[in-house]
Image (tube, grey):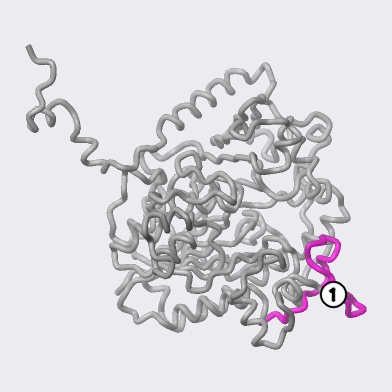
Amino acid sequence: MPRNILFIMCDQLRWDYLSCYGHPKLHTPNIDSLAARGVRFANAYCQAPLCGPSRASFYSGRYMSSHGVMANEDATRIDEFLLADYLRPLGYRSALVGKADNRKDAEILRAFGVDPESEYFRAARCGGFEPFAHHEGLYPDPIVPDDLAYNNYLIRQGYRGKNPWNEYANCGVADDGTPRLGWRLRHAHYPSRVAREHSETAWTTDRALDFLEQQDGERPWCLHLSYIKPHWPLVAPAPYHALFGAADLQPVVRGEAERDHPHPVVEAFMRQEYSESYARDETRERVIPIYMGLIKQIDDELGRLFEYFEQRRLFDNTMIVFTSDHGDYLGDHWLGEKDLLHEPSARIPLLVFNPNATADETRGSVCDEPAEAIDLLPTFIEFAGGAICRERLEGRSLMPLLRSRKRPDGWRDVAVSEIDYSDRGPRNLLDQPPYDCRAVMLRGRRYKYIHYNGFRPQLFDLERDPQEIDDLGESPDHADVRDEMLRRLLRWQRGLKPRVGMAYDNLAEMGPERDERLGFIIGRW
């Protein structure tokens, strides 16, 4: 029986906006069912709270400092191995339905003689996956492609115009019947102009079911089901636009001291238009209920998918992962969007269901050990029966944590996340050279330390201040803690794996003994 992999990712989904993570108003029973079948990781972090860099880490199993994708526009290096490259020799068909936000440079691929019509070329432009149904989910008129599959689908359903994604899926309808584009947050409460069954989330699920229908039960597959929602534009179809209201909002997490005495980089992000909008209660009360509605729709659609799994007995031999590429501030800490390294942005939900009987001990459990996005690729390889590539992969397989509640020997005690804001608005406000726009987070069990190039660090005592309000980055009483966290950061940096052209076993065998066997006798009298 083949060992299949279903890798589900939502875009910009906060870890705490699921009922299995404690949200009191947003009930997500189908997502919660994965937590009941498997392990819920309580302290999981993305490697970069921005779509492209984060996904490059998910797909490569490597930190941002190693793979070099630091902005959404950055291409992945041509010699970077991605998830599908590791699974292909094991016989897997690896396909994408939805968003990848990861590509290798087309011009470089052509320069190396890769045929633009080849399967490899198309996959390399799509996170390494076979683009079964590629949909990045952001298609304003100036950049919409001529042959967008979702637009073609909407046209077949009777929606008119050159870009029905923008004119219908990304557009609400006001009470008087006039369209209201979703690019304005003030329009979020209007229902979208597409019916629920024609929405992006439903269409993405339909395409996933189409892929599953094609499988023969013999060849193993990995399906990356990557929903664009609840990423903006925040427009939800009826009835999801009206399921929640202002009374369902969680209290905002922010303190006056954060605004009155901010860290310089955080202040620059506070001054961005999206942060100024989310700092207003009016915005939060209108927008967050729609964010919640979009999550509820994803949960309902996954219920439809899991019903198919039950009917075809796919739970018997499929590993299922549910996660997000990063979170969303939603007004917490006077911020909007993501980018920075507070918990709402860098922390992610992570649920892993392992169908093997070896995982029975941990079913329904919560794991508090620090987990990182880069751990998924080695987990998939081990599940598939492959050998973990030690010279490249920087993540650690989660399989020991799926088999036993006991902490594995040598497991990490800090999680790392990085940012590069060289292409973001704050760079100009701070007058920073692009290569200085960097920050690295170390999240330990008690302290979170954030190192900024050119600026003082931040430090939070998560035991006493779990909401990260009191910045101890300049506290004289915590100088020793900051020094120790900086030493940990240097140890982490020394452990990165920039050398990827030498197999680990060959590297381990190098030395004077091997040289002499080959006839190289150096310096002997």
Q: Residue at 75% of width from left, 76% of height from top?
A: 168
Q: Quadrant of residue 376?
A: bottom left
Q: Does the magenta stretch include residue 180?
A: yes
Element marked by disc 1: strand
The local crowd at label 1, few if under 14, some if 14 to 19, many if 20 or more residues have their Cα within 10 Å, is some
Image location of residue 212, percent across then percent down = 44, 79
Q: Left or right of 136: which side holds 58?
A: left
Image location of residue 487, percent across then percent down = 49, 23
Q: Left or right of 346: which side holds 276?
A: right
Q: Which of 439 and 315 is in front in this view?
A: 439
Q: Residue at 69% of width from left, 20% of height from top?
A: 475
Q: Can residue 404 be seen in this view?
A: no
**Mark 1 residue type:** Pro
Q: Residue at 61% of width from left, 49% of height from top?
A: 50
Q: Is residue 448 visible?
A: yes
Image location of residue 104, percent across then percent down = 47, 55
Q: How many callouts does the rendering have?
A: 1
Main SS category, magenta section: loop
- Where 428 falls versus 115 (above or below)? above
Q: Nearer the viewer, residue 171 or 450?
A: 171
Q: Left or right of 152: which side holds 94?
A: left
Seen from this angle, which residue lies furthest right? Answer: 176
Q: Quadrant of the N terminus?
A: bottom left
Q: Does the magenta stretch include residue 231?
A: no
Q: Residue at 58% of width from left, 76% of height from top?
A: 149
- Where 93 falls versus 427 (above or below)? below
Image location of residue 477, percent across then percent down = 66, 17
Q: What segment carries the magenta color?
A: 173-197
Residue linked to disc 1: 179
